[in-house]
Structure formats: C-alpha cells, structure tokens
Amino acid sequence: MNCRLTSAGAVLDFIRHNSIQTIILDSSVSGCNLSDLIFQIRKYLRATPLNMLVISDVSAEHFVVDVITAGCTGFIIRPYTLDTLKRHMRIKPEADAVHVSEELLAQGQSLLATGDYAAAIGEFKEIVAEKESEGSDEARRYFEMGMQYLLERKFGKAIVAFNNALRLNSLFIKAYEGLAEAYRGRGDMQNYQEYLQKAADEYARMDQFAEVKRVFAKITKQDIHAPNAYNTLGIELRHKKLYVEAVHAYINALKLSPQDENIYYNLAKAQMFAKRFDDALSSIRKCLELNADHSEALDLYRLFTKVDWNDDKSAKVAENNKALNQIAND
Amino acid sequence: MATLGRSNIRACPVCGKMVHCPEERHTLLHCRNFLLKQLYQESVPFRRKMLQERVNSLNERLSLTGQNLLDT
Ligand SMILES: [Zn+2]
C-alpha cells in the first residue's frame, strides 16, 4: 500500500497502525524537524527493519549529519534520477554477511511457526553464536566505523555502516526473541526467561547506540577544532551515566592520542563509575606514568589505594573502601 | 533592584565564565575546559591564537599538557 502524508504528526500516526517497509521523507516535511521525526520513527519501530530515505534540497553538512545520526538509510539530493531512487529503494539488501544471517532468521521463524522447536533453536543459535563468542562484537564494530566515517565526512559510508549496525542489532533481538519462544514451546521456562532478558539487553544497547549517535553528532558539528572528538564524547556520555559507552569512547580516543594523560584520567573515572575498580586503577597508573604531577589523578590514586603515588606506585585497590564505593554510587 | 543584590553570578577572573556562587564548583580545571570548548569552536585565527595562549598558560599552572578536556 502506498500512502502520501504531508505532516510529521500524520506520519507518526500512520506507522502506529500500519506495517511499513519503506518511508520516503522530503526535507521540507512540516510539523517538526526532520531529524527529530526520523529519530521518533526509529524509536517507535525499534527492531523493525525498514528503509527510510530522505530526499533533500539541502546538502549542508549540519543537516546531513543530523539525519544520518537520527537513522536514515539513504540520502538523495535533488535533482535525482529515477535510477538513483530505485537503487536506494531496493528492499533486499545485498548478499553480505548480515544478509546470510537474515535468511537464517527467516528460516528459524518459519520453523517456529510450524512448531518445530528443536530445528528453530538450531537456526537461531547459529545467528547468535558469533556474538556469544568472546571478543566479537560486529554490531559495535560497524557502529564505530560509522562514527569514524562521520568524522572523516564520508557520509555515504557512514550511512552504510550505521545501517549494518542497526541490522545486526535487530537481527540479534529477533533471534533472542525466537529462542525465547521456541524454549517456551518446549516448556523450558528457564531458558525462555534467559533469552527474553538477552533480547531486552540488546534493545537497551540499540537505544544506547541511538543516544551515542546523537551526542556525537552534536560534538562533530560544534567542536570542529577539537583534537579528539571521542574524548569529548566520553565526557558527555559519562555525565549521562552511559558508563559502558563512555569507556568505549575513551578507548577510541586513546587510539588517536595514545600519549594523552588526560584521556587516561577520564577513562579511569568512567571505569570507576562502571564499578570496574581494578581497570580504573590501572588507567590512573598510566595517567601518572605519563604525568606524575597530574593533581587530579594523584587524588584519585589516593582515593583508590589509600596511599600516595610517590610512596607506593604498585598499590592495590584498598579493601572495604567505603569512600570509593560512595563516590562510585553517586 | 532586588535581583541585583540576590544575584550570585559573577564572571570568573581567569576564564570569564559566568559562575553561580557558591553552588557551582569552579576550579582552574573548569577554566581550562571552558577555554578549550571556546577554542574548539573558534574559527577566527587571531582569536584562536589568543585562546591558545591562555590555555597554554593554564596548562603550565596545572602541570597539564595537551588540548583535550578533562572530566571534572
Ligand atoms: Zn574560570
């Protein structure tokens, strides 16, 4: 079914009552800011895969960064040819690695529908197998690639990378939900609960990625002369209590500026609030090894170990450290 | 002008940020962050140069290096 709507309110109302595969948005949609509308649609449809194309008269960098980070899957500038539009309209993504898993998901879902729970579990588990193995996080890898492309102003590549992150997020959510359903079908309520929780965790991560993108967009637009945008991102995320994401931002910051003691200090602080005290202490140590006069880091070292850096450089986190626990719980 | 008497906002003599006293914590590290944020957004070369000099002198006073913000 095709439908043409002229206001943001009508679009949001329409997607509430209809299942959608493709949305084409004009840059002059009335009633709200376009990137806000894209963000709202994404937020509402969450794990549902969909094409969201923006056709625009505007190609100013600020505007492009906003719609990309809000979650559009394609950006077309006027005037455009029909071929361009068709290319962006392809519902079926190319035969990439993510696509293979998407086919597995479809097979799993149809097995689930016929009541073949054991076979369905096999398909779903194959999808999440790689994710569950230690150290492989493809969704994050694509997500961080997207951010790097934004910094380099390679917008087309940024869109593709963010799309792939989103596709993987929703793939894992559907696979976990499928696993939960299949286990429930077999009367295994313990596994049912466990996989529902994993689906919920993945939803939360998807929301966090969306938030990180928005903060990052703001930074890359405003702080154009910042030596390290990831450091600024880390601070903002720490203040928003997104500690895990803040730690990831600082790790990326250190790839750009490995000798900056301040980034180690910032990382230590995020790790402290994430309650990773041992990691935090080793970051403080790295900060002080680079700059032994860093007064904030010296204070933090004392808070963690209850000794002075100059008295003992290899002290451990003090046991029953009430002051530390209290600050980390703030 | 009752508001004037009650107002506890004053400009920091080091960085110029309007600070709410005494609720808002404002140390030299906050000054450094405030000036760096301005530096990131400043595109006029001579103003960048002036900001850069102020950051350098603060870095010296604080025994810090670099131009990255510190989580305060
Ligand atoms: Zn100041």
Image (cartoon, rainbow, N blue to C red):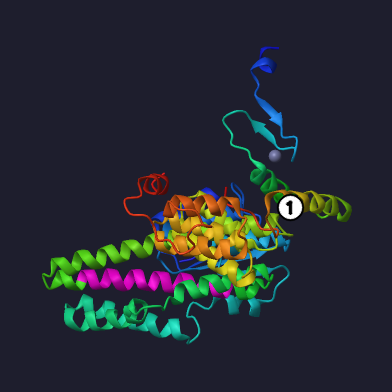
The image position of residue A315, as x and y in percent, is 43, 61
Residue A86 falls in which quadrant of the image? bottom right
Compared with residue A85, is residue B9 higher up or lower down, i.e. above or below?
above
Which quadrant does the N terminus of chain A fall into?
A: bottom left
Q: Name the residue beneath numbered marker 1.
A: B60
Q: Amino acid at mark 1?
A: Glu
| Res B2 visible | yes
Q: Secondary structure at mark 1?
A: helix
Which secondary structure is most common in the magenta stretch?
helix
Residue pictured at 59% horizontal, 46% vertical: A31
Q: Nearer the viewer, residue A149 or A187?
A: A149
The image position of residue B9, as x and y in percent, is 67, 27
Q: Nearer the viewer, residue B50 or A278?
A: A278
| Res A25 visible | no
Q: Nearer the viewer, residue A3 or A114?
A: A114
User: Magenta region: which residues?
Assistant: A159-181
Q: Does the segment drawn in magenta span residue A24?
A: no
Give left or right: position of A285 versus A205. Answer: right
Compared with residue A141, is residue A243 higher up or lower down, i.e. above or below?
above
Residue pictured at 33% horizontal, 83% vertical: A104
Q: Residue furthest bottom?
A: A95
Mark 1: few/some/many CA within 10 Å (<14, 14-19, 20+): few
Give left or right: position of A193 versus B8. Answer: left
Which quadrant does the C terminus of chain A fall into?
A: top left
Q: Residue furthest right?
A: B46
Q: Residue furthest top?
A: B1
